[in-house]
Image (spheres, rainbow, N blue to C red):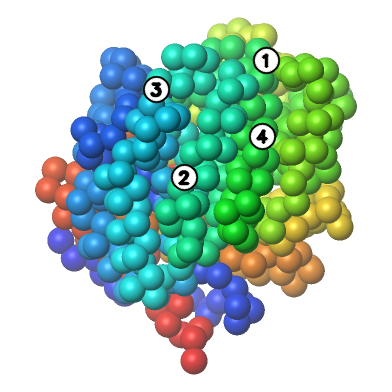
Amino acid sequence: MAASAATPAREPLPSFPRDFLWGVSTSAHQIEGAADRRGASVWDAFTAVPGNVKDGSTAEVACDHYHRYREDVALVRDLGVDAYRFSVSWPRVLPAGAGAVDPAGLDFYDRLVDELCTAGVRPVATLFHWDTPLVLQETGGWLNRGTAERFADYTAVVAARIGDRVTKWITLNEPAEHTLLGHALGQHAPGERLLFDALPAAHHQLLAHGLAVRALRAAGAHDIGIANSHGPTWPASADPADTAAADFYDLLLNRLFADPLLLGRYPDGIAELMPGDDIDADLSVIAEPLDWYGINFYQPTKVGAPLPEGTGGEFAGVALPPELPFSPREIEGHPVTDFGWPVVPEALTELLTAFRDRYADRLPPLVITENGCSYEGLDDQERIAYLDSHLRALHRALDAGVDVRGYFVWSLIDNFEWAEGFRRRFGLVHVDHATQTRTPKASYHWLREVLRTRRP
Ligand code: IFM
């Protein structure tokens, strides 16, 4: 199979600052495979339950990156990006989540980081991308405050081994999604359906983040951020019931994590719902100053008042419990990806300028740590159009004075898309999951050309 490198003529992209950081992202559970060579995570248990993953697949082999990382690093190098964002699998390093380190697990990341450095690509390491060690789940997982402390210990172990070469650190990936999908709605591992009783999982992830920032700095690391999912929330109408529902959703997605991280306080009414004897002390840990703040952007959300049971109210294709005080609505008039997500690039400009306005001088430089789309096919002109339009939207935010320092495409290669299994393809590089053959798509060639022509 060969991808066509021919793409319709487009206006060249506007110039980005010379030191703007270009990268691609992946995560451990979604690509590594070699599940027999690490401890189990909550995702292993979740995927073992029939019906939890739409195509019945698991990530036991995934993209076999554990064995093929050299080939994947060569793809990153040839693409011409500056940086590669990967995640470290906690249960690969500490099979029981704490205590004994598996030297083979650490050795893998050591080899990967060396390979990146040799290829002239900056390693950007995420410490947690949803694969909580199963042993910790058995004692409550993120509902247990102790998990935050275990995470700080694990962070210190990883930093001691690869901290001399990692150039940027991300503590957590998308704690909002992990809380909402994994703990409130049960669509992701660990499959808890706790609705608002999931809030302690949010607090403990935030605490884990703050403790990890301290552990990283104690180990001499710098350039530390977090990657959070954000998007504008639009009310379904001007009706006060709809605007109140949209404000509430905005609070959950955009403020529940960002306010404590950036302002050192929870939005009104939230602190009282959080666990712990001394929330103010926890908040001072959570608000450890960040070197930058990572935004994962995919789409805006339109939200209205709750719908009567059985008349809609879906999120990611799953019916929402009627007791939620909001209901996502369809955004019409825009193309959609294969996932059904609306393609609205101007929402990225809106999000970035709104972040600057909301957090003002408390906002560190921003990095887009994920942006991308799922489409089938090697001649993926829709992906090119998506990336091109979002880069222009990002540039408009730069023009408006928002300090954005980098952009990472999700994802380098097609991979295990959580509850969707292998049905959704986000990669710049196609992976044949039967043979593990990698084939760069048209979007890969397009991005390489974009990067080549903007370098002297
Ligand atoms: O694949 C995921 C990734 O793991 C987290 N951010 C969103 C991506 C696409 O759904």
Camera sees residue 341 = no
| Mark 4: few/some/many CA within 10 Å (<14, 14-19, 20+) | many
Mark 2 vs mark 3, CA separation in Å: 19 Å
Dividing the image into 4 quarters, which one contains the N terminus?
Answer: bottom left
Closest to the observer: 193 or 395? 193
Closest to the observer: 121 or 357? 121
| Mark 2: few/some/many CA within 10 Å (<14, 14-19, 20+) | some
Question: What residue is shown with label 3?
Answer: 134
Closest to the observer: 37 or 345? 37
Image location of residue 86, percent across then percent down = 42, 52
Q: Amino acid at mark 2?
A: Val
Circle 4 or circle 2, nearest the eye: 2
Question: What residue is shown with label 4?
Answer: 206
Camera sees residue 362 = yes
Mark 4 vs mark 3, CA separation in Å: 20 Å
* Residue 162, numbered label: none
Question: Counting residues from the N terminus, which is met first, the one under dot 2 or under dot 1?
Answer: 2
